[in-house]
Image: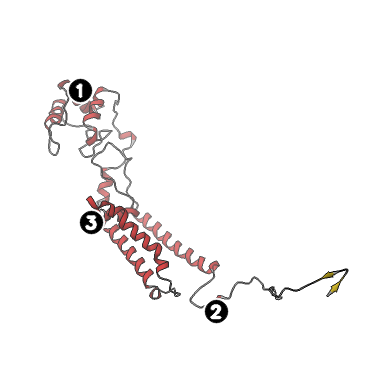
């Protein structure tokens, strides 16, 4: 074909002469096997997430969690617990095969195999169907992981008296906190000898609270030397003069 002066047009057989419109594929050709991401699949995911979120919020409003006081590193008797979504791992470490000399199995090997298996599930089960009975490997692994996590979480939570724990470690309002002279020599002696069991603010921990004790200074000094109840003797190893200063300090707290 000639047009103009020395110009030629040629055709390329590799390019289709029919222009195809960018119309999405009709998914009705594949019933039950696939669907459009927008809006079908995304809407289902949003609805499922909304139902879970509303249910979770209702449970939180019906039974609000008990809050504890600020963490005190000096309370040696305090047993910290992880958040509820880690309780199943906390419970796992109580078994003999995942604790003690085998603790690495409990903190690395078993969780690693469990989460690694869930990541590999889509590659281990490549069936074309989407129904549970058509994906036995993936569904079985998911049910096993879900059942194990729920059972371990329930078992861990059932062993804890949450209300008693919150009551024992409830926050102390500033108006109820004892006035303590932390620059005094008595507090220095208390810090070196008693703080690990009775807390930074004398609020108690492994041992009872020492705020507003009913005993006299002599009785407190005798307890510090000889012990009482679960408290063994010999907890204080300073001089008699230091013991008197410590006892006077403890008796003075909460009496102002």
Please identify the quarter of the rendering in which residue 194 is found. top left
Q: Do the residues labelled 3 and 1 touch (CB within 8 Å)?
A: no
Under tag 2, what secondary structure? Answer: helix
Point out residue 187 in the picture as x, y percentages from the top left corner. 25, 26
Measure the alpha-carbon separation of dots 3 and 1: 50 Å
Q: In which quarter of the image is the N terminus?
A: bottom right
Q: Which residue matches tag 2?
A: 29
Point out residue 40 in the picture as x, y percentages from the top left corner. 52, 69
Residue 176 to residue 249: above or below = below
Measure the alpha-carbon separation of dots 2 and 3: 53 Å
Nearer to us of marks 2 and 3 is 3
Nearer to us of marks 3 and 1 is 3
Q: Nearer the viewer, residue 122 or 166?
A: 122
Horizontal side of residue 204 vs 57, given as left or right: left
Under tag 1, what secondary structure? Answer: helix
Residue 97's disc is 3
Residue, x 86% and y 69% (percent of image)? 6
Q: In which quarter of the image is the C terminus?
A: top left
Residue, x 25% and y 48% (percent of image)? 164
Count of marks overlaid on the render: 3
Q: Which residue matches tag 1?
A: 245
Point out residue 30 in the picture as x, y percentages from the top left corner. 52, 78
Q: Which of 249 and 85 is in front in this view?
A: 85
Measure the alpha-carbon separation of dots 2 and 1: 89 Å
Q: Which of marks 2 and 1 is nearer the N terminus?
A: 2
Point out residue 17 in the picture as x, y percentages from the top left corner. 71, 75
Q: Earlier in the sequence, mark 3 or mark 1?
A: 3
Q: Earlier in the sequence, mark 2 or mark 3?
A: 2
Nearer to us of marks 2 and 1 is 2
Residue 26 to residue 153: above or below = below
Q: Do the residues labelled 2 and 3 touch (CB within 8 Å)?
A: no
Residue, x 27% and y 23% (percent of image)? 184
């Amino acid at each position: 074909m000639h047009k103009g002066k020395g110009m030629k047009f040629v055709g390329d057989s590799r390019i289709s002469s029919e222009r195809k419109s960018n119309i999405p594929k009709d998914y009705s050709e594949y019933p039950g096997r696939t669907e459009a991401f927008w809006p079908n699949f995304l809407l289902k995911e949003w609805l499922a997430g909304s139902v879970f979120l509303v249910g979770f919020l209702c449970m939180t409003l019906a039974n609000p969690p008990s809050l504890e006081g600020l963490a005190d590193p000096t309370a040696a008797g305090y047993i910290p617990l992880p958040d509820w979504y880690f309780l199943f791992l906390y419970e796992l470490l109580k078994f003999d095969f995942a604790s003690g000399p085998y603790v690495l199995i409990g903190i690395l090997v078993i969780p690693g195999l469990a989460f690694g298996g869930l990541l590999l599930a889509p590659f281990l089960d490549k069936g074309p169907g989407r129904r549970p009975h058509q994906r036995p490997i993936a569904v079985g692994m998911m049910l096993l992981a879900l059942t194990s996590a729920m059972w371990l979480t329930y078992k861990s939570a059932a062993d804890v008296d949450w209300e008693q724990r919150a009551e024992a470690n409830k926050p102390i309002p500033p108006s109820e906190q004892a006035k303590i002279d932390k620059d005094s020599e008595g507090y220095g002696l208390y810090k070196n000898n008693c703080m690990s069991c009775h807390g930074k603010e004398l609020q108690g921990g492994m041992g009872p609270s020492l705020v507003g004790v009913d005993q006299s200074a002599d009785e407190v000094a005798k307890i510090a030397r000889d012990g009482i109840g679960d408290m063994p003797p010999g907890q204080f190893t300073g001089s008699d003069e230091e013991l008197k200063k410590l006892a006077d300090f403890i008796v003075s707290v909460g009496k102002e």
